[in-house]
Image (cartoon, rainbow, N blue to C red):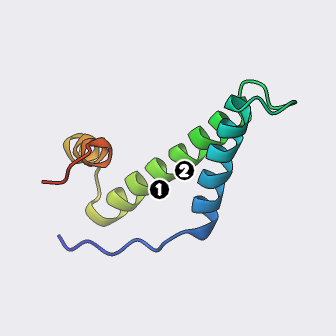
Amino acid sequence: MTRTPIAFRHDIQGLRGLAVTLVVLAHAGVPHLAGGYVGVDVFFVVSGFVITSGLLREAGHSGSVSLRRFYGRRALRILPWRP
């Protein structure tokens, strides 16, 4: 199966940047941003969107979703090295 390249999403990267900024500012003690919960919420929403999009793309291409491939991709994403 050939993989089609995924387009770079400036909107998603912008939301990720916003989420990280909100959490960093909350940890820096900026008033009215105590806890950084909005940043964490934005991060989880973006993560859910990205994961769901990938699963839907895989289901559209192959007609099913492989949990082995799904968890393999997650592991490769968080590992500090690339095989």
Looking at the rendered structure, which numbered label has been put on residue 45? Answer: none
Query: Does residue 57 lie above or below 5 as drawn?
Result: above
Query: Does residue 21 lie above or below 58 as drawn?
Result: above
The outermost residue toward the front is 28
Q: CA distance from mark 1 to mark 2?
A: 6 Å
Q: Quadrant of the C terminus?
A: bottom left
Q: Residue at x 31, y 48 (%)?
A: 77
Looking at the rendered structure, which numbered label has been put on residue 53? Answer: 1
Q: Nearer the viewer, residue 47 or 31?
A: 31
Residues at marks 1 and 2 touching, judged by CB atoms closer than 8 Å = yes
Q: Nearer the viewer, residue 72 or 61?
A: 72
Q: Residue at x 31, y 75 (%)?
A: 4
For this view, does 23 lie left or right of residue 61?
Answer: right
Q: Position of residue 57 (x, y in %)?
A: 39, 61
Q: Position of residue 1 (x, y in %)?
A: 17, 70
Q: Residue at x 26, y 40 (%)?
A: 71
